[in-house]
Amino acid sequence: MKRVLALGAIVGSMAAALALLLLRVPLLPSPASAEAQPIDRLFGLLAVIAAIIFAIVTGFLLYALVAFRRRTAADEGRPLHGHAGLEALWTLVPLAIVIGLGIQGGRVLRDITRPAGGGDALEVRVQGLQYAWLFEYPDLGIRSTELRLPAGRPVLLRLTARDVIHSFWVPEFRVKQDAVPGMETRLKVTPTRVGEYQLACAEVCGVGHSFMRAKVVVLEPEVFREWAAGQVAQATVAPGAPQVEQPVVTAPGGGLHAHTVAGTR
Amino acid sequence: MRILSLGLVRGLLAGLAGFAAGAGVTALARAVSGLPAWSAAPAAAVGTLTGLVAYLLAAGVFTDWIAWARGAEASDPRHGPAHGPGWTRYFNPDPSHKVIGIQYTVASLVLFVIAGIMALLMRLELTRPGLQVLSPQTYNTAVGLHGIVMIAAILVGIAGPINYLVPLMIGARDMAFPRLNALSFWLVPPGALLVVTSLFTGGFNTGWTGYPPLGARDPLGAQFFYSGVFLVGLSSILGAINFLTTIFRMRAPGMTLFRLPIFVWATLATALISLTATQFIAMAFLMVVLERLLGMGFFDPAKGGNPILFQHVFWFYSHPAVYVFVLPGLGIISELLPVFARKPLFGYKWVALSSVAIAVMGFFVWGHHMFTAGLERPLIVPFMITTLLVAVPTGVKFFSWLATLWEGRLSFETPMLFVLGAIVIFLVGGLTGMPNGIVPTDLALQDTWWVVAHLHHTMYGGFVFPFLAAVYFWFPKVTGRMYSERLGKWHFWLMLVGVFLTTLPQFRIGLLGMRRRVADYDAALGFEPAQLGTTVGGLLVGLGTILFLINLVRSARRGPLAAPNPWRSRSPEWQLCSPPPEENYAAPPVVVGGPYDYGVAGSAYVRLAERPATGALTTGATGGR
């Protein structure tokens, strides 16, 4: 009994310390989308569960290292072969935990992917290509190499890729979606915080992968409207002119493959 | 030409000649049919095939089979090489499971060093932002090679202990198909060579996963990479056939399934996966090669193909493969803990069956690698549930290990240290896998360094540390000599500190936005200190590995002679002399009790038949001395 109490004290204090540490230290970039909030709460829950399990196992190990050290060379342990009740316990409790986590994960997934009601979402077509991103706003008739979004309004990104698989990721938005050639994938994101972010390709896509980035700017809704109007005006001033200057990223030191980098267009 | 008495040298030379001949014939055939004579990809493809056949023939892998087919007697290498010193045996095809086990283990260490050098190259590049050492192309190739050579090292690494130990543990004379066993091993050198050749033939950009369309557009290096993996996979399948047949057909009298040493159960589970799933990665890679060579657009949307199809087929093996890597390691943990705790393995049947459960469940989780790929929502949630469920049998193992320690009498020699380290490291790997298994959190983590750190924890804890524990533990059995405990402990602490110093910063910056497989990162992100930590951690692991290799070589030659059973193990192989005699047991041992009855007074596991008094068969030729 004394052993169990000592063990409980070690495990309990380790779990508490670790959970506090994980919850206090900001582990993720500060969130900038509505979707980030439930995801971050889920991270918090997982951090606490992980802290507890880590403390149980390592606390037990530390205790065993000291308490069950061999003293004489021929010393033998107590021949305990097993205990069906204990085995059932540590099968069923983890089972309940993972089912609970699965349900919670499913709920959060449903919340962050629920389509925005009433056609309210701003639609943006996103095309990934080696090694750049292109954005098109079909409702506004704008094309851009920067992704500008109004704060507070759901955005439906319709992604595709021109050549190989790319992946759309803004760490502050949390959510991520691959852009796949030959098909359309979708990602809903609702930016909440005005500011500048970096979109980076998350799926390795060739020699220029490291440099496949684009600027994402979240604007106040009225500033966004002004920008959109300005873009439309510009496009009508110069009809026929290439609407988007296609960026060609030449990776430094491209080596053997450099010709294909420059030849992407 | 004494050097030509080595099958490896003969095989590689003939392989090169065969490659050149195949490439030449291809050029000729193209010229005859009016195509431009030289085209590197088809020439290399045909050359790979002809080179492989020439290598196997010249190395002597088929010699016995050819002799049988002609009605002649096969050679009997049981008493060492007919000519040349004893060590030459390891460089020739040899049907003895103990020779093959050592061949696999040494090959694995060689591959580890190669893959480790790739890792250090990457560390050199990433320590500071900007491009300093490697071009992005070389960097990407180093990423892919580090991954795939490590995977080969692990597949080969599990085959080492399995080959050496399983026949001994079940009281068999050898594997069921000794010559097939030799073929499995001899497919590894050309496979590894092809994979590494990719570095000098333009490289490849995809990482080890080889995703098309990128993989279909990559330079010639990609073709060598895909072909090499194909061969290593074939080796793995053939090995699995042998392991399963041996375990099911060749157990000693009384060795019922629930009296098997637990490592044999792990082998059984892992072989079930290798035998039935490896075909899928082979098929996926073959289809990309065909797309590259013949324009078959399996994964090319412009030709009606689908890039996502590849990912399904690929991960249908490549997730279960993770359990191929770790189940033997977890088996080694379960095998060694009772010996060093002087207690029975707690819940033997639960631990044994949990391996099988993990193996079976592993087939239903592949979609969790594709949560961001555009899977249909109704598919995503079931994959999340099945993924999380794997935690249950894995948890059974952890808790059974802890209960095995309870009221034990622990001692902390190097193998035990590595076992305890493995438990902690694998635990972190499991816990950090939770947010990868749960879809919403995985959306943030997919393709980041979080995943990199997580997978390295599962590999270090599930394979590397247990493998090292096994090498130390069975070193006196294999060589008859003792390793240096002092160097072993240094090795352990360097590795343990090195691993955490590598991965903790990786977890941290992975959460903050460090993407996978990038040669460069934005200096503004402030990741430099973390990158430096990771590099120092990698160097510590490298330093530990050097100490380990020194220890192995020095101790094998000059180490003190080991006691017959230095660990007081109950397992049958420790009841033999070290190194064990060529034929293992003079007569099949009789199993009379449970494997882990440590602390049970008067209990016995196996009874060995008396040796024949002449001792003619006891001159063990496997010591390499």
Image: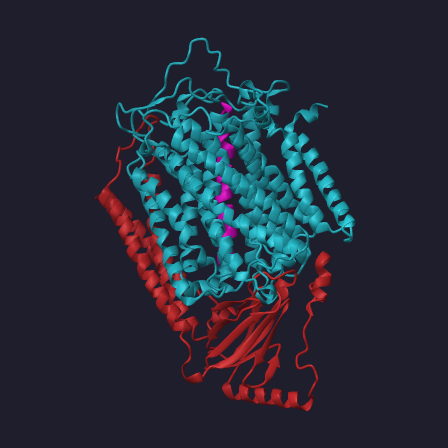
Chain colours: A red, B cyan
**Residue at 56% from the left image edge and 20% from the top image edge:** B73
The part of the image, by quadrant, that contains residue B591 is top left
Front residue of B24/B550: it is: B24
The part of the image, by quadrant, that contains residue B565 is top left
Q: Is residue B623 above or below residue A216?
A: above
What stretch of residues is rendered in magenta?
B479-507
Point out the residue furthest to the left here: A1
**Residue at 47% from the left image edge and 34% from the top image edge:** B242
**Residue at 41% from the left image edge and 50% from the top image edge:** B362
Secondary structure, magenta segment, majority class:
helix
Front residue of B247/B146: it is: B247
| Residue B489, magenta (yes or no) | yes
Q: Is residue A233 above or below residue B446?
A: below
Front residue of B402/B289: it is: B289
Left or right: A140, with B200 as reference point: left
Q: Where does the image place residue B383, in percent across and percent down from the top left?
A: 40, 59
The part of the image, by quadrant, that contains residue B419 is top left
| Residue B570, magenta (yes or no) | no
In the rendered view of the protein, which quadrant contains the N terminus of chain A? Answer: top left
Q: How many marks?
A: 0
Q: Is residue A43 visible?
A: no
Point out the residue furthest to the top here: B614
Q: Is residue B141 above or below residue B551?
A: below
Point out the residue furthest to the front here: B33
Front residue of B144/B230: it is: B230
Q: Where does the image place residue B329, in percent across and percent down from the top left?
A: 44, 40
Q: Where does the image place residue B58, in percent across and percent down from the top left?
A: 66, 30
Q: Where does the image place residue B157, in percent across and percent down from the top left?
A: 51, 38
Q: Is residue B128 above or below residue B487?
A: below
Q: Is residue B568 visible?
A: yes
In the rendered view of the protein, which quadrant contains the C terminus of chain A? Answer: bottom right
